Amino acid sequence: MVSKAGTRTIADGIKAGLPFMLPTLAIGMSFGVLAEPVMGAVAAIAMSFLVFAGAAQFASVGILAAGGSLASAVSAGLLINSRFLPMGLAVAPALRGGPVRRAVESQAMVDASWALANRGDGTFDREVMLGATIPQAICWWGGTAIGVLAGSLLGNPETLGLDAIFPAFYLALLAEEMRDRAALSSALLGAAIALCLVPFAPPGIPVVAASAAALLGLRARRS
Amino acid sequence: MTVAWITVALLTAGTVAIKAAGPVALGGRELPPQLAGVVARLAPSLLAALVVVDTFGGDRALVIDETAIGLVAAAGALVARLPMFAVVVIAAVATATARALG
């Protein structure tokens, strides 16, 4: 099939995802190091393979490590992943096929690939999202395995400053979104909403609530 | 099954459902055009929130620690248009150094 000029392909998505391989590998390694003593090698690697959502995995494992209950570990992870609800609605029109295929394609949605697929005009690029997820998956799974297996050699991820890579990774993705004033104002409002809620709301809620900052876009349409 | 495996199973099932919910519920329908501006602003809103929560979010409290130094260093590297691997290394080294000195 010949693609139209300007149409982006899965290969373009893979290419867009390449710069984010190193941070994902490093964050995956940190997760492996932290998760292995808490849940065992196989469960830690299985979690990265199956759940495939870093922030939620860190939260759940952190709660188990601190002696928290199963229910609180699961609910914290799910609250953190609740951002995938608005993200899924946003990307939905770009996906294809019937309900089963849509459900399968939606599993490729991770923060980096979803953000890279954002065209900035209210639409998303399906091929870029599917493509950009491939290097993310390789590094997340591989990084977790390295962290699990070589944890004793790597030492404490915090001593190495690896915990600073997660916010730096999101900041780099955010930098790519800074196309215009609208993006800047949404980012500032989103950050403000999240910071205000951190002291009062359970983990996960501050981030999903920040999606309300996008409602600024309604006002823009009226003019 | 151990607690770890039950956590993995439940978290997997829930995450799959959350990710699939929007695309399955909407089917092939387009979003109303009034929402285009909202959808366009969703990524910067959520990513900015993830940045600040990962940096300053503690256990129901705002915390300023060495991670903030890493974030400032990363921002500087991004402004200088350094390649991504440099941004990551600089963030980690800045945080690790601040911790070692602190």
Image: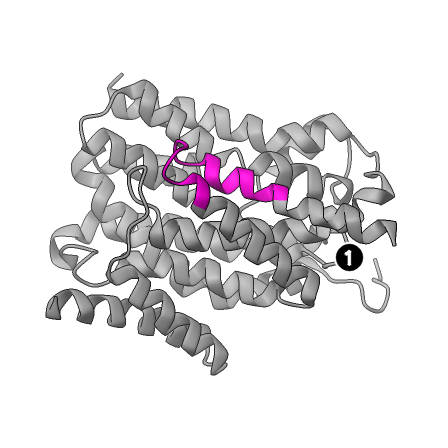
Region of the chain picked out in magenta, as a range: A196-212
In the orientation shown, which residue stands out farthest toward the bottom?
B80
Relative horizontal placement of residue A92, taking residue B70 as reference (left or right):
right
Task: Name the foreground residue: B19 vs A44.
Answer: B19
Q: In this rendering, is residue A206 above or below A24?
A: above
Instruction: Sort mark 1 into few (<14), some (14-19) or many (20+) by Cα contacts within 10 Å.
Output: few
Q: Residue at x 35, y 55 (%)?
A: B55
Work out which quarter of the rendered image holds the C terminus of chain A and state it. Answer: bottom right
Q: Nearer the viewer, residue B84 or B79?
A: B79
Q: How is the image coloured?
A: one colour
Q: Position of residue B31 (x, y in %)?
A: 81, 38
Q: Is residue B74 above or below residue A48?
A: below
The residue wearing badge 1 is: A121
A204 vs A126, left or right, is left
Q: Position of residue B97 (x, y in %)?
A: 18, 71
In-front residue for pair A124/A126: A124
Q: Is residue B57 above or below residue A72?
A: below
What kind of residue is marked 1? Asp
Compare residues A51 and A170 and report the one nearer the observer.
Answer: A170
Q: Position of residue A111 (x, y in %)?
A: 53, 49
